[in-house]
Amino acid sequence: MNTANYLSKIYPDPPCWALVADVYQTEFNQAVNEYKTIDSSIREIAAAFRIALHKNAHGFTRIAEPINYCVVLMSRSEDIGIHHCGVYYEGAVLHAKEASMVMLDELSAIKDQYKVVEYWAR
């Protein structure tokens, strides 16, 4: 995967899931169905992730250790629930926090920022 191609893109709200969908479409020609939220609040996004991944609607299963192209789900607190995601690749996580802020952070930095980190793969 050429991560530079994604770092220069701008994604719509919520940008983290739009980035994940773009990676799966571009790299594997696999659609990851969009989810809908009432608004872009953290709780709405967390609920949408539960539907998209936790309920296994798209063929994802939780794995113990990251592998290339797995979806990384993140949360700063267990109380809030999962509210951010990215794609693991070569020891780093490609993720988007805002529409124009796509980043590639080492997994160790992600674990320092987020209390909850889960890995999901197809």
Image (cartoon, rainbow, N blue to C red):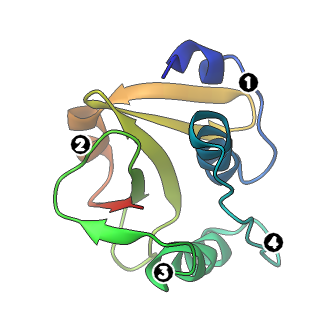
Q: Which residue is mark 4?
A: 39
Sequence-earlier tag: 2 or 1? 1
Inspect the image, locate mark 4, and give the three-letter code of the amino acid beneath it: Asp
Q: Residue at x 57, y 81 (%)?
A: 57
Which residue is denoted by mark 1 in the rendering? Answer: 9
Secondary structure at badge 2 equals: helix
- Circle 4 SS class: loop
What residue lies at 48% left-to-right and 72% top-to-bottom?
59
> Distance from label 4 to label 3 (Cα)?
23 Å
Crowdedness of circle 2 by 10 Å Cα count: few (<14), some, many (20+)?
Answer: few
* Of marks 3 and 1, the one in the foreground: 3
Height in image: 48 above or below 112?
A: below
Name the mark on residue 112.
2
Q: Secondary structure at mark 1?
A: loop
Residue found at the very far bottom of the displayed protein? 55
Residue 120: % across, % down: 36, 62
Q: Position of residue 83 (x, y in %)?
A: 52, 64
- Above or below — where is 17 with respect to 55? above
